[in-house]
Image: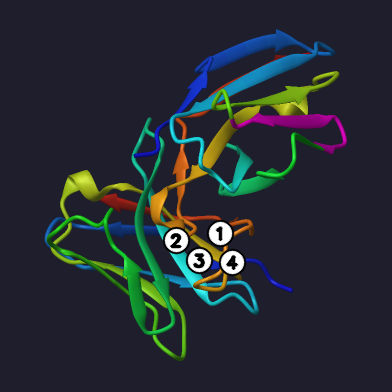
Amino acid sequence: NAGVMQNPRHLVRRRGQEARLRCSPMKGHSHVYWYRQLPEEGLKFMVYLQKENIIDESGMPKERFSAEFPKEGPSILRIQQVVRGDSAAYFCASSPYSRGSLNTGELFFGEGSRLTVL
Amino acid sequence: KQEVTQIPAALSVPEGENLVLNCSFTDSAIYNLQWFRQDPGKGLTSLLLIQSSQREQTSGRLNASLDKSSGRSTLYIAASQPGDSATYLCAAPGPSNTGKLIFGQGTTLQVKP
């Protein structure tokens, strides 16, 4: 059973370009979370998605950032018109948590995608 | 609002020493608490998950305790080894029962041979 798979592991973009980060959750997991870790800072929650639904996007910047988790395929975090301040490690986590029930499960994290904006 | 604090921010110990990492959280209405390890440039590895009904969990040389009433958790590492050198992160659930975690800033541990 493969773990949470993220790609690319490293991505370099110039200012103004778009960055797309992909996350495939663990098999059987239908809940995906994205976190950002800025240099020398802790992990900050960005967004929580289930298949075809955004459940909680309270941590997403208001502009340029979007996320989706389609019925088929990986979850995608999209950053438009990147700026140097977007340089960070972006982590995806998945959980088998069933909405509506008490969450007693763990989150399982991927290796992260490290974005560098030149 | 859940806030998680970890002290110390950094710790350096000689090999073989037993040590304790501390984590405190402001909202005690949690259903679990999770400890992670992060190596430089790597992802997060889950170490221990303590459910709210438990007071502690053990895995090998690691023991994590949870005291909801005081808003504290500790990670105890016995007989530390150089391979234990990493950043240790504590995470508690945020509000609204969506499963999202609020992380502390971490404790960076260096175990010297």
Residue B101 is situated, as x and y percent measured from the top left of the image, at: 47, 48
Please tell me whether residue A15 is drawn above or below residue B7 in the rendered image: below
CB under 8 Å between discs 4 and 3: yes
Tell me what residue is drawn at x 45 percent, y 36 percent. B27
CA–CA distance in space, label 4 to label 2: 19 Å
Q: Which residues are magenta?
A: B58-68
Classify the position of the C terminus of chain B by image quarter: top right
Residue drawn where x is 80% and y is 31% of the image:
B62
Dot 1 amino acid type: Gly
Q: Is residue A41 above or below residue A44?
A: above
> Which element carries disc 2, helix, strand or loop?
loop
Q: Chain of mark 3?
A: A
Task: Give the residue number, with chain letter if any, for mark 2.
Answer: B98
> Which chain does the residue under circle 2 lie in?
B
**Residue A82 falls within the magenta-colored stretch:** no
Q: What amino acid does circle 4 point to?
A: Val
Position of the N terminus of chain B by quadrant: top left
Q: Secondary structure at mark 3?
A: strand
